[in-house]
Amino acid sequence: MYAKTIAKAPLRLGLAGLGTVGMGVIKIVQEKADLLALRAGRPVEIVAVAARSKGKDRGFDLSGYAWEDDPVKLAQREDVDVFVELMGGSDGPAKAATEAALASGKDVVTANKALLAHHGQALALAAETNNAVLRFEAAVAGGIPVMKALTEGLAGNGITRVVGVMNGTCNYILTRMEATGQGYNALFDECARLGYLEADPQLDVGGIDAGHKLSLLASVAFGTQVNFDAVELEGIERITNEDIAHASDMGYKIKLLGVTQMTGRGLEQRMTPCLVPNSSPLAQLDGGTNMVVLEGDEVGQIVLRGAGAGMGPTASAVMSDIMDIARDMRVPTFGQPAATLVEATPAVAAAPAPYYLRLELVDKPGAMAKVTSALGDSGVSIDRMRQYGQDENADVAPVLIVTDPAPRASLDAAIDAMQSSGVLVSDPVAIRIEKV
């Protein structure tokens, strides 16, 4: 009955990029055309596509779509209402085509986190200048509707903190290290064989990919201009099986964790390995799944969990933006007019927190006393400490310390004093403990 009342003109899409996500979008449009029309109140159809190779067999019939070799020309076609950018890359064709679409007054949907992390403010201003919308649900946490939650569901909240695991590859490696006892290098190679790594693996294991996502979340959560350069980045390369085992023994799991919050010192944006208590929902997150925790002054804590990548989940997020446009739901790119977004002062130091500290001490009298003296002189107190049996052939005494909350600068000063005292066999490992 309702289907007969659909009389609006179709929403016409121009899709650039026919990789995994692009083909996922085509699959949804082709297989769910009637459902999309019912839910949007108008048909949604693809009229033209662009990609690097026209002749490649992609498993779907593309003969009904016009082909453009140049994505900029696709973005400027008069029969395209929404330009869907799924090419990737912070510059080059993705940026040029997105700019061309916005200049032509066309709405844009993208899954390109790098593009927005580096050029988000300029693109948001261009969208508003040309009465267009720029949507990017799929750029952050795959199929999890976190942007919709922030801009719509939690619009009546002052956001106090956003915390999350936002890179499935890193979470896969860390959870497999714990489950199998395999080392980082072996699991890195496994991820390469399974196709889990970006073309530049450092984007994954170095935290860059997740840092892009965090900078976008921070902008929406705190009304600030995107500033990826201010994100503190540290990857998972230095995490060892010993750290994972010792953390577990003390009631923690290690995660590559993104944290952003506005403080009196400025805007914190950190994407670094952290320990989380076993009682935290983040500690239960295994494999390639993502989780984002949103904390608001009215609602308290909201936990969103789901697939962070893959054809179906990411295409689902792309389609959610397309459907909003089809329904004439028009929201500013970062939740409020781009001209009102402030340039946030980056926090020069993170808020005080407890730390996990792994030390290898020379096995001789007085070594532990020098460690406790260095911590005490720097204003860092010890919550608990464990000493494990040393290797009888190495004359090394492994020691684990969990500190009370302290500024990182104070901990670093204590570590410097320890290194100067000559009691350390190797560089210590210090990992922040995040209470979530």
Image (cartoon, rainbow, N blue to C red):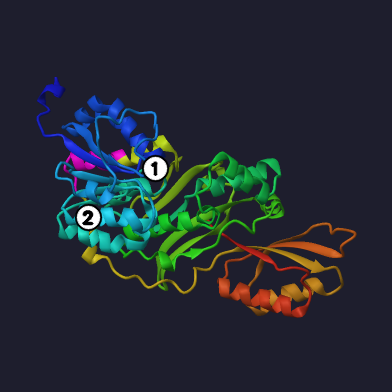
Say if mark 1 contacts mark 2, CB within 8 Å.
no
Q: Taking 122 as reference, is 174 above or below it?
A: above
Q: Nearer the viewer, residue 176 or 390?
A: 176
The CA span between labels 1 and 2 is: 29 Å
* Residue drawn where x is 48% and y is 62% of the image: 270
Which residue is most to the front? 55
* Residue drawn where x is 35% and y is 70% of the image: 344
Asked which quadrant contains residue 95, the reply is: bottom left
Asked which quadrant contains residue 18, the reply is: top left
Q: Nearer the viewer, residue 420 or 212?
A: 212
- For disc 1, the marked residue is 144
* Residue drawn where x is 62% and y is 74% of the image: 412
Name the spot of residue 60 as percent of width and height, x first.
35, 28
* Residue drawn where x is 24% and y is 34% of the image: 65
Q: Which mark is residue 100?
A: 2
Q: Amino acid at mark 1?
A: Ile
Q: Taking 9 as reference, is 344 above or below it?
A: below
Q: Nearer the viewer, residue 145 or 111?
A: 111
Left or right: residue 272 versus residue 345 is: right
Residue 334 visible here: no
Mark 2: secondary structure: helix
State which mark lies toward you, 1 or 2: 2
Name the spot of residue 265 as percent of width and height, x first.
42, 73
Name the spot of residue 427 as percent of width and height, x first.
71, 68
Q: Is residue 327 magenta?
A: yes
Quarter of the picture containing the N terminus is: top left
* Dot 1 crowding, Cα within 10 Å, few <14, some 14–19, many 20+: many
Q: Which residues are magenta?
A: 319-330
Q: Taking 51 as reference, is 343 above or below it?
A: below
Q: Is residue 435 magenta?
A: no
Left or right: residue 434 versus residue 230 is: right
